[in-house]
Image (spheres, rainbow, N blue to C red):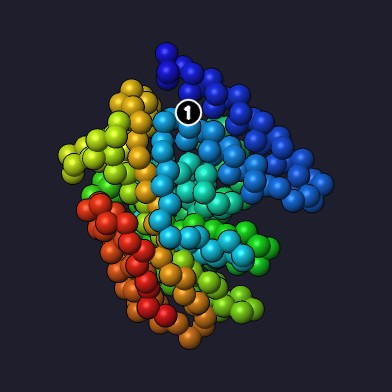
Amino acid sequence: MRGLFVAALFFIITPMLIFFQWVLRKLNAPGWGTIGRRYYSVLCTALRMRVRVVGEPVRNRAVLFISNHVSWADILVIGSITPIAYVSKSEIGNWPLVGTAAKSQRTIFVDRSRRQQTGDAIADIVERLAGGTSVVLFAEGTSGDGNRVLPFRSALIGAVKEASARAEHGILIQPMSICYTALNGIPMGRQHRPTVAWYGDLDFMPHISAFIRRGAVDAVVTYGEPITADASSDRKVMTRDLQSAVRQMTSATLLGRYTPARAKS
């Protein structure tokens, strides 16, 4: 029954999200971020996801968040904290309803197999940031099992470097970690984190059905110290430093030590 309730709620409020975002865009009016954050918060509540924030996301200007990636649930958890746009694989844009909702939330779609399309995505990132919209980039390029941070793709960070070169005053980057730490109030061990993690060839519907049945999940989002990237930034060094910061925050969180990490500037 709970699964039916969550499904009904999703199919009721998602068209509402799309409609109100469309109206705001047509009127060139503010408020898209507030609407999106409340939408994600409602879904987190319905799915019994309890969100804890460690550190503080940059809020006074647009920022590029560099994060690890664990699950579809990341979108809801991160989006419930602060207004955000995502960089997503192009297939998501073709999903019924979900794709339309993602577009209404200013998602940047990228087909990493096509060089020209990646260049277009870089331009979109710059446009979002210049327009005051913060963006999340999942730098692993895929989702993991929740127990570790996969190597960051230097090509993606290279796109950040190129984007920073196009920006007038560089780009502010903030490393961020997302972890799932407890199920029904009981700390998760390594063997339980795949309950939330969605990776590999896992089918979505069986996964979300099991997720709903299992009960309340605790999520911890940790924000590190922001750094400024510009045209002089070294791609490999920047990739290494951001990856190190996210790994430190993830390891600390999984060990119960909620400590933000700093990426070297």
Q: Quick one: label 1, few (<14), some, or many (20+) residues within 10 Å?
A: some
Quarter of the picture containing the N terminus is: top left
Q: Say whether residue 225 is left or right of residue 26.
A: left
| Towards the viewer: 115 or 223 | 223
Q: Residue at x 50, y 60 (%)?
A: 57
Instruction: Tally the numbered discs.
Output: 1
- The vertical placement of 7 against 186, above or below, is above
Residue 91 seen anywhere in this rendered image of the structure: no
Estimate the x, y position of residue 89 in percent, counting from the top left.
46, 50
| Towards the viewer: 46 or 256 | 256
> Helix, strand, or loop for circle 1?
helix
Q: Residue 13: name its quadrant.
A: top right
Tell me the residue that label 1 is attached to: 46
Q: Residue at x 72, y 37 (%)?
A: 20
Q: Residue 153: name its quadrant.
A: bottom left
Estimate the x, y position of residue 144 in percent, counting from the top left.
29, 49
**Residue found at the very far top of the displayed protein:** 1
**Residue found at the very far right of the displayed protein:** 27
Quarter of the picture containing the C terminus is: bottom left
Residue 3 seen anywhere in this rendered image of the structure: yes
Q: Say whether residue 139 is left or right of residue 78.
A: left
Q: Residue at x 47, y 35 (%)?
A: 44
Estimate the x, y position of residue 217 in percent, counting from the top left.
35, 35
Q: Say whether residue 205 is left or right of residue 131.
A: left
- The vertical placement of 98 against 81, above or below, is above
- The vertical placement of 134 against 162, above or below, is above
Estimate the x, y position of residue 133 in percent, counting from the top left.
62, 59
Q: Residue at x 66, y 36 (%)?
A: 18
- Amino acid on which disc 1 is placed: Ala
